[in-house]
Amino acid sequence: MVITSKNNPIVKELASLKEKKGRRERGTFLVEGDKMVLECIESGMRIVRLALASTKERAALSKASFLKDALSGGEVVLLGEDAFRFVSDEKTPQGIVAEVGIPSVEAAPPTGRCLFLDGLSDPANVGAVIRTAAASGYREIYLADCADPYSPKSVRASMSGVFFCKLMRGSREELLEALGGVPLIAADMEGENVFSFLPPELHCICIGNEGNGLSELVRSRAEYTVGIPMREPVESLNAAVSAGIMMYLLGYAKQERR
């Protein structure tokens, strides 16, 4: 059966996940595209529902059968073109959307080097940081007062990184308490040159808000402050770019020089 109406309850539930309120109420988020959905399934995330565009119905039915076997649970529905576009957050939808359960993760001490995001407000930046964190090994991420990492824009920018990182959200006080005695490294342009800084093996890099930098609370708790040297007249870098440079220099590159 193909669902064609945008007023269908399933369609409305899926479409609601484009908004923070809908994600909070259902405890789920959207993942779009063949590659992202397959990687989501492979990661072991809980798939609640899959929606496929029925433009090419025979191909969609074949894909639905394959994915249902891969899912071992979860609902698979076919949507008409208008209904699918209503659900999709993409300008050019790829014809597959997954409703995925948001992991319930409590703030806890890290098991290795980690990342603290302090007030990042741009979901694309949050997603880009998560992508690089997954690649560089900073897979435990503490998010205080940040844009929702499960928004469609952030999930898209994470390029599947959101499936493979442990995301812990809470107040600054709660997250800092969970970090305990882990040395905090504040990213600030006035800090010590990051290229010559040798970090402790276990550490947490702190990245601040795009416009205002780190909060006073996080800055005051940091044991080290490091910065990226820049040529005039440039005064700052994008938060996601800065985080990427820091993670690779303080993680892989510096560890290899010990």
Image: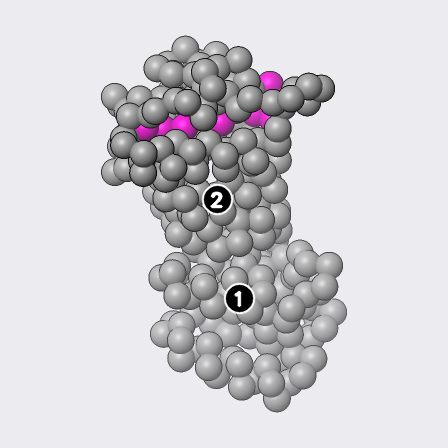
**Residue 124 sits above or below residue 76 on the image:** above
Under circle 2, the secondary element is helix
What residue is rendered at 56% in x and 36% in y?
Answer: 240
- Residue 205 covered by magenta stretch: yes
The image position of residue 203, as x and y in percent, is: 32, 28
Q: Amino acid at mark 2?
A: Thr
Which label sits in the foreground, 2 or 1? 2
Q: Amino acid at mark 1?
A: Lys
The residue indicated by pointer 1 is 35
Dot placed on the residue nearer the N-terminal end, 2 or 1 = 1
- Residue 197 appears in the figure: yes
Q: Quadrant of the N terminus?
A: bottom right
Q: Mark 2 packing: few (<14 Cα in 10 Å), some, or many (20+)?
A: many
**Left or right position of 88 against 27:** right
**Left or right position of 49 against 18:** left
What residue is rendered at 28% in x and 26% in y?
Answer: 200
Q: Which residues are magenta?
A: 203-212
The image position of residue 255, as x and y in percent, is: 31, 35
The residue indicated by pointer 2 is 132
Distance Cα–Cα, label 2 vs label 1? 18 Å
Q: Mark 1 packing: few (<14 Cα in 10 Å), some, or many (20+)?
A: few
Q: Which residue is more in the foreground, 222 or 199?
A: 199
The residue most toward the front is 257
Q: Quadrant of the C terminus?
A: top left
The image position of residue 110, as x and y in percent, is: 28, 35
Quarter of the rendering containing residue 58: bottom right
Quarter of the rendering containing residue 51: bottom right
